[in-house]
Structures are given as structure tokens and as C-alpha cells.
Amino acid sequence: MIDADPALDGTALDVVASTLAELGPLDVHALYKLRVDVFVAEQDCSYAEIDDVDADPGTTHLLARTPDGGLVATLRVFGSKEPGGVMHIGRVCTTPAWRRRGVASRMIRRGLELCGDGPVEIGAQSYLERWYEQFGFVRCGPDYLDGRIPHLPMRRDLLG
């Protein structure tokens, strides 16, 4: 899907949804590099950034690229769409140069489309609670630490 968004000054971003197995090796490298740059280096967290959820065939990775192929944002969607199942959105990150330009909002909306109408849960960084509320998420538990970063559980229930 290629689209232009006025919040991005008319810059078209190519947003691709793929399993890890469907991505080429350079895409996997770019995906992991972005996540490690943001979560491990920038946010000073020391945890296993690359995990088994990434390679699960039911996990979909969204990658947003500029026309020249540069990766600017990513997230992953996983879980169960079966009755009683819950979908999850996680590892949401954007390169510093592309923050506050609407990219993450577009990625979350696309991730929610992939989740369908069932419940969706996220582990949000605490300072982003109000931001996630615009997508229908509400706090569903107490704060916790993920690495050294304060987080909170949030959930968007069934639509319709």
C-alpha cells in the first residue's frame, strides 16, 4: 500500500505487511536495526529485543519506508482472531527524524485494521497513555516496568 499523508508534507510512504519469513534479509536487518537503535540504544533498555514472537508465522510486521527504501517506522501484530482470542500490537517505533509527523498514528491505524474487530491489547509506555486513547485504548491494569521504562497495559475492546 502506498499513500501520501498531508501530515508528512506529501511524502509518500510504502507500508508493507509481512511475516518475518516473507521479508528479505536486508529488510529483516533494517527492522532489527531500527528496533535495537530505538529500544536498546536510545531508551537504554537491556532485554532480548529479538524474540520468538517475531518469527511466529502468525505475527505480521508492518514496515513504513520512504520512496528511496529507507525504513522509518515499524510495529508488529500478533495474537488470535478466534472467538475469545486477543490480538496484540507491539514494538511500535519510529526513527527520530520521522517522529511527530503522523507516521506512528498511521501505523497504529493500519495495525488495528489487521487486528479486525476483536479485542486488542498493548503494553504502552506510560507517557503515551493519552496518545493511545485516541485509538480507543483504555488502561486495563497497573503500571509496570519493562526494562527501565514505565509501561501500562491498555486494551481496545470489541468494535460494533
Image: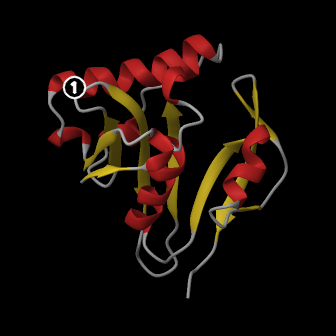
Q: Quick check: 64 above or below 29? A: below
Near-viewer residue (96 or 79): 96
- Which is more toward the observer, 6 or 58? 6
Counting from the top left corner in percent of width and height, residue 66 is at: 30, 32
Please determine whether, in this image, residue 77 is positioned above or below residue 55. below
Give the x, y percent position of residue 20: 25, 39
Task: Tell me where residue 80 appears, x and y as whole percent.
Answer: 42, 66
Q: Is residue 155 above or below residue 14?
A: below
Residue 55 lies in quadrant? top left
Q: Amino acid at mark 1?
A: Asp
Q: Is residue 95 visible?
A: no
Front residue (pair 87, 41): 41
Q: Quadrant of the C terminus?
A: bottom right
Which quarter of the figure is the N terminus placed in? bottom left
Figure coloring: secondary structure
Residue pictured at 51% horizontal, 38% vertical = 91
Question: Of all residues shown, which one is farthest toward the bottom?
Answer: 160
User: Residue 140: x percent and y percent?
Assistant: 77, 61
Seen from the viewer's position, the closer of residues 150 and 79 is 150
- In the displayed structure image, the side of residue 1 where residue 54 appears, left or right: right
> Residue 143 falls in which quadrant of the image?
top right
Residue 68 seen from this side: yes
**Badge 1 is on which residue?**
68
**In the structure shown, which secondary structural element does the residue marked by tag 1 occupy?**
loop
